Image (cartoon, helix red, strand yellow):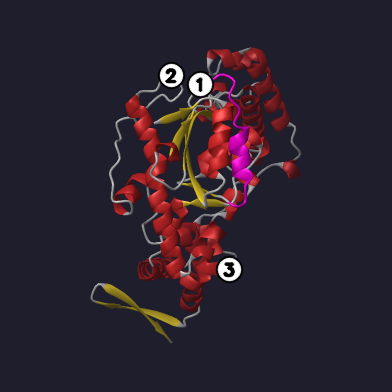
Amino acid sequence: MITIKTTEALAEFCSRAAHFPYVTVDTEFLRERSYYSKLCLVQLAVPGEAEDDAVLVDPLAEGISLEPLYELFRDEEVVKVFHAARQDLEIFYVDAGLIPAPLFDTQVAAMVCGYGDQVGYETLVRKVAKAGLDKSSRFTDWSRRPLTEAQKTYALGDVTHLRDIYEALSAELAASGRGAWVEEELAQLRDPATYRVDPDDAWKRVKTRTNSGRFLAVVRELARFREAHAQSRNIPRNRVFKDDALLELASTKPKDHKDLSRSRLLLREARRGDIAEGILAAVAAGLNTPPEDMPKLASNGRDKLNVNPALADLLRVLLKARCEETGVAQKLIASAADLDLLAAGKREVRALSGWRAEVFGDYALKLCEGKLALTAKGQKIRLIEL
């Protein structure tokens, strides 16, 4: 096994890789102790069986630059193949401001090809590559050096089998004519906005059922401060304060350090210094928010949508039937919320556009309009146009 530890060796491999149609890529990283993932290992493989066709790159090696790799990522003639690419792409976007292109995600392709919802790499290795994976190193601390031979073997397996999976799925997509479906799904992964976390939107991830505008205004300001503070210091947001502490602060609305000292949920270090000052400023900003600028929780409850529950149930049956017939994962077509929207008469739903309309959306509209009936025959659901 070859481990690359110098910029020169990386440049040599990437120069050779540029002559191949694709390169498979995976990463190992840590995120438990930081806001941004710490890149600990990059695995690369090109077609072939030679030892130097699959390598490990040590980004922690002294003096190494990943610029040769990023140059390869910019090469439009070489497809960059990942499995479940989002976290890997986020690392490269944060580090270098780029998203590898052209891009292929075998998890997305597998969902289009009928392997199920969010199919795991191990499953594809077994079903497509007809191989097994050694899982003994799955919970490795990849920042520690030296890596054992077992750890290296485990890591390399994430890109060597990926070659077989990519070639098999590519052939399936070509035969089925569904390559464009995958390309449409990859648009979100190619969008830089996918990897940017705006502190202004952080409050939307805090789970609360309270719809008081004033309460939510304080939640928004606290979440904004926490996100920005965590980003600037590269620490986990929960190291600033956790959601339960945030909600407590939004309820008690502390005005000074004495009030902060009464918190049951704040960590000791959050009751003083920059965090304490940030909390007090955020609470004050929330309390001073004009009524017209106060946030509101999105209303997506079934009752408020006026959902027809019987129609929603029929749409679920239709979705299952169409996905079984076409071999496409249900998750790719429509969510439960999408079906509720359709059953409430809403038409701004992704299932009604693009290739999803061909698989499900057109049938769903006919069902909603009374132009399609569902019948059962044995274990199958039949569709009858009226």
Could you tell me how far apart the alpha carbons at marks 2 and 1 are, in whole angstroms? Answer: 37 Å
**The residue stretch that appears in magenta:** 61-77
Q: Nearer the viewer, mark 1 or mark 3?
A: 3
- The residue shown at (74%, 36%) is 289
Q: Position of residue 46 (x, y in %)?
A: 47, 45
Residue type at tag 1: Leu
Label 3: state its secondary structure.
loop
Residue type at tag 2: Arg
Q: Nearer the viewer, mark 2 or mark 1?
A: 2
Quadrant (top left, top right, bottom left, bottom right) of the N terminus: top left
For label 2, the residue is: 145
**Can I make out residue 210 in this image?**
no
For label 1, the residue is: 265
Could you tell me how far apart the alpha carbons at marks 1 and 3 are, in whole angstroms? Answer: 44 Å
Residue type at tag 3: Arg
For label 3, the residue is: 347
Asked if the magenta segment contains residue 72, the reply would be yes
- The residue shown at (43%, 19%) is 145
Q: Are marks 2 and 1 in contact (CB under 8 Å)?
A: no
* Crowd rating for badge 1 (residues with CA inside 10 Å; few <14, some 14–19, many 20+): some
Q: Point out the tag, 2 or 3, that comes first from the N-terminus.
A: 2
Q: Position of residue 106 (x, y in %)?
A: 45, 52
* Crowd rating for badge 3 (residues with CA inside 10 Å; few <14, some 14–19, many 20+): some
* Crowd rating for badge 2 (residues with CA inside 10 Å; few <14, some 14–19, many 20+): few
Q: Are marks 1 and 3 in contact (CB under 8 Å)?
A: no
